[in-house]
Amino acid sequence: MGCAGSTDRVTADGPTLAPPSFDASRPWRLHPQVALRDEAFGALAYHYGNRRLVFLRSPALVELVRSLEHFDSAEAALAATVGERRRHGYREALARLAASEVLDAR
Amino acid sequence: MPAELHSGLRDRLALGLDAPICLTWELTYACNLACIHCLSSSGRRDPRELSTDEAKAVIDELEAMAVFYVNIGGGEPMTRPDFFELVGYAVDHRVGVKFSTNGTRLDRAKAERLAAMDYVDVQISLDGATEETNDAVRGVGSYRSARRAMDHLAAADFGPFKISVVVTRHNVGQLDALAAMAGHYGAQLRLTRLRPSGRGADTWAELHPSFAQQRDLYEWLRDRPEVLTGDSFFHLSALGEPLEGLNLCGAGRVVCLIDPVGDVYACPFVLHDEFKAGNVRAPGGFSALWRHSELFASLREPTSAGACASCGSYDSCRGGCMAAKFFTGMPLDGPDPECALGHGDAELAELGGHGRPTPSADHSVRVPVRLVARA
């Protein structure tokens, strides 16, 4: 976040420390306390509970996140919306988003 | 987050967003304290203050623009009789609230009321780990009232409120004690940079941390990523690995300020006509100012490194803080007066206090305020 007596906790696609464990075989959804705001670069996600601001840095990732609730597993959502070669990177992005509670296990 | 992962995003944010991510909203200039570094020169209520209905209309706009939250301050925001009404209205409209208070009005009942609300975050201002250090800046009795407010919040089980500290030459040696105090309350420590704004223009020279203290502060913050800073020390990122955050001046790009009378300023630390975009009462309201004001458009244009172009650290600090430069009379396209590499020192010394802008407004109480002498 830019300076401004502003946001204190900001990350791109969630924290990078401590590789998160993420079960892609489970169903996930956007956390009910998270607001997504579309932006040219992707979207901003703000978690009203932990007050963390997260940047989703690609429109494709935003679409994937929004689609999660329609699939029985994150893996199924990945298969439906992301080409196979790029899936690994997007799976990791989902893992980071889950670690910062942008995603919520259903 | 490694800097290279951020750089593309930072460049994009520097061009500005269609709506601020968050903004600072000073609800009133009225304040029962008279801190010697007050960046809004608060004290007296301004009779033109936004009414309850006008304030709610601003919140409606923020909701429509999907602004995630507001940082409410003042003055002392809790002196407004409609304080809870406005906070409640904001959170009911999905505009989260973080508010800063000196704690004098935060009794047990109000702490319990706050604890019962979602999406409200409280910051108690405290500028020293001891009564002596704090009261020299914030006035006699202010340490005790702040600690009392913290006790009330803890007793009401509010959760992790924030202890908000403006770092000065005199309290920078007390950061460990302040962190321990936060730990004692289950609170979070939040440090912000002293700006030469408002009454701080007259006290900055004697209060701002020394060169050596800044370097120690950088190391201290590097070791404690859990300490919040609102990204306000990004000028220190020139010292090495960047600090947490995007290390970017967000003024007019991703943040701004609304003052008690509805004037909109690009930077929360520059309440000055030169950085005023207009007033929310004008046709089009806040959103028209954010999206179409010439001032904001100019702040979103690519900036020149100016005198900093030859410095290898420009990419880390981007020349530092606009407010710090403006109020010390330094050129905006040159080094920060507190440049961690010392590039601002010569210019600052040469200016010798000259070239500082004339304050646009001052709501200080006109009677002399008694302050305790600093040890």
Image: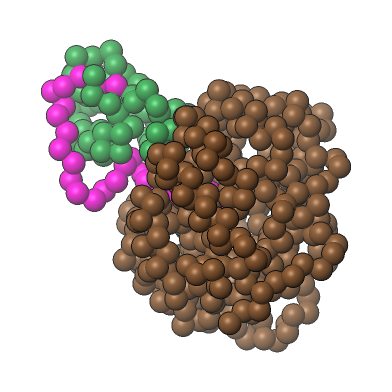
Chain colours: A green, B brown
Q: Left or right: where does residue B201 sit relative to residue B344?
A: right
Can the viewer see residue B21 in this picture? no
The segment highlighted magenta reads: A1-29
Q: How many numbered tags mark residues here?
A: 0
- Above or below for B169 versus B26: below
Q: Could you say which is closer to the camera, residue B119 or residue A28?
A: B119
- Above or below for B65 versus A73: below
Q: Residue at x 13, y 23 (%)?
A: A25
Q: Residue at x 56, y 37 (%)?
A: B110
Q: Residue at x 70, y 43 (%)?
A: B79
Q: Left or right: where does residue A39 sit relative to residue B225?
A: right
Q: Residue at x 54, y 68 (%)?
A: B131
Q: Could you say which is closer to the camera, residue B328 or residue B176?
A: B176
- Above or below for B6 versus B83: below
Determine if the magenta segment contains residue A9.
yes
Residue B320, image x, y percentages: 55, 66
Position of the N terminus of chain B, as image quadrant, is bottom left
Position of the C terminus of chain B, as image quadrant, is bottom right
- Above or below for B52 versus B294: above
Q: Could you say which is closer to the camera, residue B12 or residue B343?
A: B343
Residue B291, image x, y percentages: 68, 36
Residue B283, image x, y percentages: 82, 29
Determine if the magenta segment contains residue B76.
no
Can the viewer see residue B180 in this picture? yes
